[in-house]
Image (cartoon, rainbow, N blue to C red):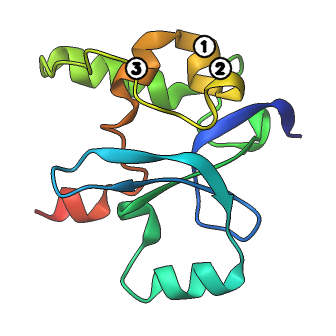
Amino acid sequence: MSSPDRTCPSATCTPGNQLLGVKGEDGHVRHLRSSLTIDAEFVAAASELGKPEARMRFSSPCATSGCAQWTGTRCGVIDHVLEHLEQARVPLAASLPPCPIRASCRWFDQTGERACRACSLVVTDQSAIAAE
C-alpha cells in the first residue's frame, strides 16, 4: 500500500520513479532543482556503469508497510542515518539544501530540518563504499 501524500527520498532506479540528485566528487548528493521522471531507457543507460543507486538518488511514492525500511509507524532509514552521523560526529549541513520533494518528503515529515541537513550525505546503495 503506497502513501500518495508522502515521497520516499531513497528509492530505486526504476522506470516511473524520479531522479532526485547526483552524487558529486565530494560524495555529497547534489539535488536537482526539479525531479525528472525516469524511463526504461534511462535505467538501462545508468545501469551500464554499475548500480545507479550508488551514484544517484531517486524518489518514489512512499510504500509504507510495503517497504522493508518501514518500522510500523515511520521510515527507519533517516533515524539510522541521523543516529550514525551523531555517533560519528559528522556535522550536518548549515543550511537547507535545495530539494524538489521537501513538501512531500517522508523524512522531512518525520524529522523536519535535521533530515534535510543530513540528506546530501545519504547514498542509497552503499555496497561500493562498504567494499573499500
Closer to the camera, 47 or 18? 18
Dot in front, 1 or 3: 3
- Answer with left or right where residue 1 lies relative to residue 72: right
**Answer yes or no: do the residues labelled 1 and 2 have beta carbons within 8 Å?**
yes
Q: Amino acid at mark 1?
A: Gln
**Residue appearing at x 53%, y 34% in the figure:** 99
**Residue appearing at x 44%, y 22% in the figure:** 116
Q: Which residue is mark 2?
A: 74
Q: Which residue is mark 1?
A: 110
Q: Quadrant of the C terminus?
A: bottom left
Residue 77, placed above or below residue 73? below
Mark toward the start of the polypeptide (2 vs 3): 2
Q: Quadrant of residue 128?
A: bottom left
Mark toward the start of the polypeptide (1 vs 3): 3
- Answer with left or right where residue 72 lies relative to residue 44: right
Q: Amino acid at mark 2?
A: Arg
Other residues around mark 1 within 10 Å, as few (<14) / some (14–19) / many (≥20):
some
Q: Amino acid at mark 3?
A: Leu
- Give coordinates of residue 54: x percent, y percent: 36, 62
- Give coordinates of residue 70: x percent, y percent: 65, 31
Mark toward the start of the polypeptide (1 vs 2): 2
**Residue appearing at x 17%, y 64% in the figure:** 131
SS for callout 2 = loop
**Residue appearing at x 26%, y 55% in the figure:** 24
Other residues around mark 2 within 10 Å, as few (<14) / some (14–19) / many (≥20):
some
Looking at the image, can residue 71 be seen?
Answer: no
Residue found farthest to the front:
33
Q: Which residue is mark 3?
A: 96
Residue 35, placed above or below residue 99? below
